[in-house]
Image: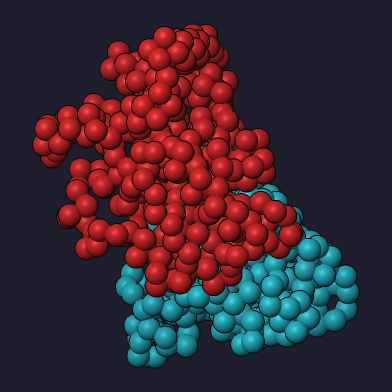
Amino acid sequence: MPELSYREAVRDALSTAMRQDEDVFIMGEDIAEMGGSMGVTQGMLDEFGPERVRNTPISEAAIVGTGIGAAMQGMRPVVEIMYEDFLTLAAEQVINQAAKHRYMSGGQLKVPLTIRTQGGAGWSPGAQHAQQLEAWFVHIPGLKVVFASTPSDVRGLLYTSIYEDNPVIFFEHRTLYGIKEEVPDELEPIPLGEARIHREGEDVTVVATGRLVHESLSAAQQAEEQGVSVEVVDPRTLQPLDEATIVNSVKKTNRAVVAHEAVTRMGFGAEVAAVVQYQAFDWLDAPIERVGAKFTPLPFAPVMEEWVIPHADDVLQAILRTVGRDGN
Amino acid sequence: MLLIRRFEEKVEERFRAGELPGFLHVAIGQEAVAVGVCRALEEGDVIASTHRAHGHALAKGTHPNELMAELYGKLEGCSHGYGGSMHLYDIERGNLGANAVVGGGLPAIVGAALAFKFRDEPRVGVAFFGDGATNIGTVHESLNLAQLWNVPAVFVLENNHWAESTPASQHLPITDLSKRAVAYDMETMVVDGQNVQEVYETAAKAVEHARSGRGPVFLVANTYRLTGHYVGDPQVYRPKNELNELRETQDPLDKLRAELDISDDEFEELDREATELVEGSVEFAKAGTDPKPEDALKNVYA
């Protein structure tokens, strides 16, 4: 099995779809010659040409809206919004248009559009280039939302998203582009709505997304050394959500921690906690712990940024609290 | 045009009678723009409409029965009861949807036109929007992208001189709105929107320009909204004499009638046909099927 970086895995999913299907094309800011601000689309201009690897003006609303129009004609555009912070500029087109055309038309239309974007802190860009806004979009009926945390997942899920007949907001995490994982020789699509159990455990379930999947795996290893067995579940798709895998895990472990890089308040973990308490109330032996960023915009100074966003130790402390240990 | 007028008069009447839910905007006075432009289109061409959409939908071929049924919230409606007056769709006839967000439909028309170009199909996308929309970002982003990519699109600006209750003098620093497209180096055309023949001939040129690959066109149709912003609008912001004077001098139906020089008998015959169609559409709509409440959960996802 070949080893791909997360960045290469995204590129492979895009290129695979574009090789086999003329209806797939990509567009976004700086994606052609420059290969995207994260280098994801490097080399694709040479293979596919400027018609199908389209540089756009800095016009987020028109990038998404043009994607919507082409998608309604049966194409499968994949548009890139350079930073998820900039989804705010396209929010009208995402929320009022992409998510609602099918509904408002009484089912006459499909919008098979994929919106790729990325975010994530840990490199001190300040408050406007690293937010984690995935929860906003889970709140909008009509959208599907994916947040992939590993190379094999990002490859299989992006491919599926391209062939999904509904608009998908596809979140990538900036600090994960360099991580590597063995992937299947042939691209294997991963269905939306299926969680991945990264590690099985008996005592505590950690439901984590994005970078926090890796922080949680690290925390689980440390917990193991302290005699606490941790199961780590990555939903991978936030909408639709694989509630069954999460709930079944908690019914086994009787304790749950939710963990993401976004601020805790109204974060995706709040929804997971609600699902778990409702479906597994009688199985819970401890309050559900929540791990996320502190409630502040992202600061610039590295020492402040480091303190604001969650790390493995925050997950570990939360795990230990669920089993009644102080941890410190 | 007469059908659109009678249809919208009926809509006003039924709304006031309390039969129509929601928020209704009629385009009385602007019929010649919808008809002139849509008559210049061919099968396969698509439009995106605005919140003032009944005329566009009828002119693009949606049957009054389906349109009225939509306004009554029936499954037989052109959006099957999911859209309403501000979200009229008819994909089979190339209506990609009326849009209740000002300027919201333009980017999708650029995208549709891009798809036509990709596939080398001789089709054109047409976006309707108003003078108020020329102040919103999506319009400018769309014009820029359409010209940059040379896509077959026509942008029809229905300049009715009002953004809801705000007159042009309070929201536009210019009076010649074709200047909006100058910065994009886009082909512009300006037409008297109350003269249907002129609209048709100019729109035909614009559509042909776009279809032949020479790029998008910005078509300004100067027109007049001879009613309020919404049905029931008391129009406290508008001098009464202005409206009365415009109704006397700028009614596109009066202009067409004079142009055609038809007799009263001929006009009455046409009027009777239009009125019968409209009355029939109300009967059709009232006899239509109400959706079940739980139908609300359908069509969220494909």
Where residue A136 sits in the image (x, y, percent)?
Answer: 45, 57
Residue B7 vs B117, above or below: the answer is above
Given residues B76 and B176, the one toward you in this image is B176
| Quadrant of the snapshot with the N terminus of chain A | bottom right
Tell me what residue is drawn at x 76 percent, y 77 percent. Answer: A48
Given residues A137 and B261, the one toward you in this image is B261
**Would residue B278 be found to the left or right of residue B102 on screen?**
right
| Quadrant of the snapshot with the C terminus of chain A | bottom left
Q: How is the image coloured?
A: by chain
Where residue B186 sits in the image (x, y, percent)?
Answer: 47, 67
**Would residue A93 be found to the left or right of residue A165 on screen?**
left
Colour in which the image shows chain A = cyan
Residue A150 picture quarter: bottom right
Residue A318 vs A226, above or below: the answer is above
Residue A165 vs A172, above or below: the answer is above
**Would residue B40 be found to the left or right of residue B35 on screen?**
right
Colour in which the image shows chain B = red
Where residue A255 sits in the image (x, y, percent)?
Answer: 55, 57
